[in-house]
Image: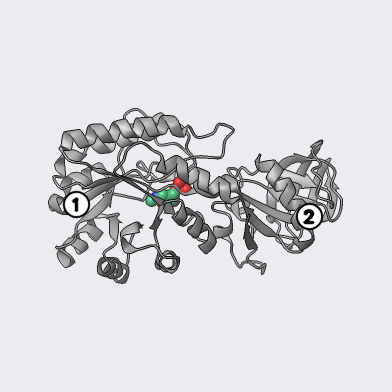
Amino acid sequence: MLIDNLKDCVKKNYKDIKNPVYVYNKDVIIKTCQHFTEIPYKNKSIHFATMANCNPDFLQIIKQAGLDVFVNSQLHLEEVKNVGFTNSQIIFTASSISKEMMECVYREGIQINLDSLTQLEFWVNKYPDRNIGIRCNIENKFHRPKTGRAGSFIGENSRLGLTEDEINSIKTKEQINGLHIYVGTDIIDIDYFTSFYESLIAISDQFPNLEYLDFGGGFGIDTKNNFDFELYGKKITEIMNRFSAKRNKSIKLILEPGRIIGGEAGFFICKVTDIKFRNGTQYIGVNASSTQFPRPLLYPNESNHPTYLFDKSGNLKNTKEKDTKINGCSTYSRDFLSHKTSLSEAKIDDIIVLGNAGSYCSSMYTEFLGFKKPKEIFI
Ligand SMILES: Cc1ncc(COP(=O)(O)O)c(C=O)c1O
């Protein structure tokens, strides 16, 4: 269905694609938001992680679909306020937060998750009247932290959060109203999520005033298997019901999905400007740069973006017989938009489309090399 919409879009917009653009399918974004809002557990709020995509039109769509937001910087805080999110709809989670930023979050009455004992001590001394959450970096006897991108978010190699020893040493436990955990990114293994959630619950008894558990994000799309929302919803509801019953009060569930909300809804579209062959591989040059589509630059081995080739009338060429690399039009040797794919033989003015481009793509744009931030279109 997505690819049919895309074909239409390429056909209709071909003439306008003088410069590279991001195109998003609104319905797909809304549908993904609904998967979260339909999780049966009632006392919940779903905070979209704005680092995945902070385009104001994107934020409007997720707002209308009933999501709140999670931000980690001053600029994103301003952006979400500009599109109308109220302070109670915002969660601030970051690390090494400046005193000025803490003051701002305090003044605005925004819920914050702190990342270290030092920051906690500062907050408790300065703002004894305001409860806070803490980000927990805890181990799990069933799963080693996943290696690669996920491995650096949790576990002994991660710089983030408070370790179990640090958590146990906290003196001001009654001022903690929430526990936060972020298990990694691009994960579809539901047992992996839930076993870390259970570990968080296992350390929660020491905090008498808990109001929420924030299980972060990490929901994956870089795979052929779709994320099983039904199973996830069932399991998380069971976990939260059990926990609320144990606490004898309704504990709020907070999730912070990023990538999955718009990832598959977004496409990057650019035009073929050059073709070369090297050792049997087709090098397709395009009127764009990896600075405009930065994931293959930042994660050369881990970015997974389906590629499509259309002729200049907008017809999909899908024989895919040529080993292909897609390169940008700069002089930078690492300027690749795809390191390895298979496509039909390309011609000048054909159209290249890269999928899974709705998250951590436009938001990772960099001015390095001197290419403009691409326009973003929502259809
Ligand atoms: C604390 C926190 N929550 C949520 C997210 C969103 O993660 P994802 O895009 O993997 O869902 C991130 C991303 O880095 C994060 O650091």
Residue 146, quarter of picture: top left
Q: Which mark is residue 285?
A: 2
Q: Nearer the viewer, residue 372 or 301?
A: 372
User: Residue 346: x percent and y percent?
Assistant: 84, 47
Q: Is residue 135 positioned above or below 197 on the image?
A: below
Q: Which mark is residue 128?
A: none
Q: Nearer the viewer, residue 110 or 331?
A: 110
- Residue at 81 percent of width and 45 percent of height: 315
Q: Give the class, few, some or many, for how many residues have Cα within 10 Å of label 1's Cα (few <14, many ≥20).
A: many
The quadrant of the image that shows the C terminus is: bottom right
- Residue at 85 percent of width and 43 percent of height: 345
The quadrant of the image that shows the N terminus is: top right
For the residue labelled by badge 2, is the local secondary structure a helix, a strand or a loop? strand
For the residue labelled by badge 1, is the local secondary structure a helix, a strand or a loop? strand
| Residue kind at label 2, given as amino acid type | Gly
Count of marks, rendered view: 2
Mark 1, ligand 1, within 8 Å: the answer is no
| Residue kind at label 1, given as amino acid type | Ile
Q: Which mark is residue 176?
A: 1
User: Residue 378: x percent and y percent?
Assistant: 61, 57
Mark sitting earlier along the chain (1/2): 1
- Residue at 31 percent of width and 41 percent of height: 42
